[in-house]
Image (cartoon, rainbow, N blue to C red):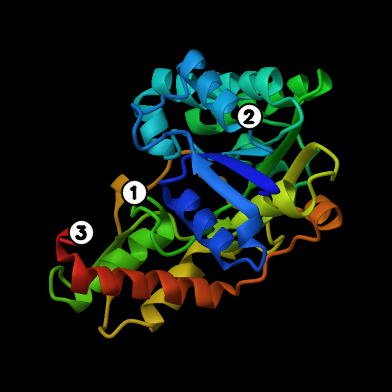
Amino acid sequence: MTRHRLLVTGLPGFVGTVLANRVCERADAADIAISGLNDPEDAMVDIRDADAVAAVVKRVKPTALIHLAAIASPRDAADDPAEAWAVNVMGTFNLAHAIRSHAPDARFIFAGSAEAYGATFARYCEPLREDAAFEPTSVYGATKAAADLMLGQMARGGLNAVRFRPFNHTGPGQAPAYVVSAFARQIVRIERGWQEPVMKVGNLEAARDFMNVRDVVDAYLAAAVDAPLAAPGAYNLATGSPIAIQTILDTIIERSERTITVERDPGLMRPSEIPVVSGDATRAHEAFNWKPRVPLSETLEDVLNHWRELANTQPETLQ
């Protein structure tokens, strides 16, 4: 008999794909059934449709729901704030309400964001803990903060909610809208002669708390499978050791086969850039025995090699 039934929103996406792979790699994979919102024979389920969401939850009766689906690009959220609020907040409410109504014993695992802290980072030198104030500076951060607060309130009414606040995470397969993947893609284009040996970059002085997506996914699975009785609440996922974007770029360029010149592009500069972003993940370690395990150097190598493989198999994705 299946012990765990995981219902995952955003399963076909970057993080969802990694999560599914991590489940397959586990020794207890046979005890874990994983499914997305969409049955292949049914119409696509939109999380803004409360009735459709409720129907899926009633059918699957999950032991845990891992909510990954979102308007996840800050640029996309800024371009269409109404959709970002509808998906990231009301979509989250629909899922949480369906779980509370139709699978009340299930754990609700929310993939929030450290962007919810926003301007608070600028007032502290040390990594932020979960009791730091929410002061989001972007539409995306505001929607994630609002959903986080909403789930915290619903937890007081009985929802078994774990609200993760992951910091920057990357890995093979991430869209080039994100900095590490963007750097790696440019480098491979240069290696193939599809771009002049000049990289266009934004602010390199900012420092961020980078992790491998596999480590983040392992936290979600720990909450869903390995420690389902751990206390509900909010948990940062971070290394506590921010690294400058300049260092990220230098490390990737060192692995290139070409000599590359770097140029600043004013169009890539973010006007409200916060100098240093870092988090304290002590609570996650204590509750789930979680900590980042994949070295950043390995992560960057994997992302670069992923784009090299795509250049061989799907060159149109780089041209």
Of the 4 image quadrants, the one containing the C terminus is bottom left
Q: Which residue is mark 1?
A: 268
- Residue 152 in the figure: left or right of residue 16: right
Q: Residue 90 vs residue 316: left or right?
A: right
Residue 50 visible in the current orientation? yes
| Mark 3 vs mark 2: in front | 3
Residue 219 to residue 60: above or below: below
Which callout, 1 or 2, points to the residue nearer the camera? 2
For the residues labelled 3 and 2, the Cα–Cα distance comes to 33 Å
Amino acid at the residue labelled 1 = Leu
Q: Earlier in the sequence, mark 3 or mark 2?
A: 2
Residue sitting at the far front: 1
Q: Splitting the image into 4 quarters, where does residue 22 fall? A: bottom right
Q: Secondary structure at mark 3?
A: helix
Which of the two labelled residues, at mark 1 and mark 2, occupies the earlier sequence position?
2
Q: Position of residue 9 (x, y in %)?
A: 51, 37
Q: Nearer the viewer, mark 3 or mark 1?
A: 3
Q: Residues within 10 Å of mark 1 (few under 14, many from 20)?
A: few
Residue 64 in which image quadrant = top right
Front in this rendered view, residue 54 or 271: 54
Residue drawn at point x = 41 percent, y = 57 percent:
179
Q: Amino acid at mark 3?
A: Thr
For label 2, count other residues whose C-alpha is less than 10 Å away and answer few (under 14), some (14-19) or many (20+). many
Q: Which residue sits at x=83%, y=50%?
A: 283
Numbered circle sitting on residue 317: 3
**Residue toward you, 178 or 277:** 178
Instruction: Tell me whether the residue at label 3 lies in contact with that at label 2, contact meaning CB atoms closer than 8 angstroms.
Output: no
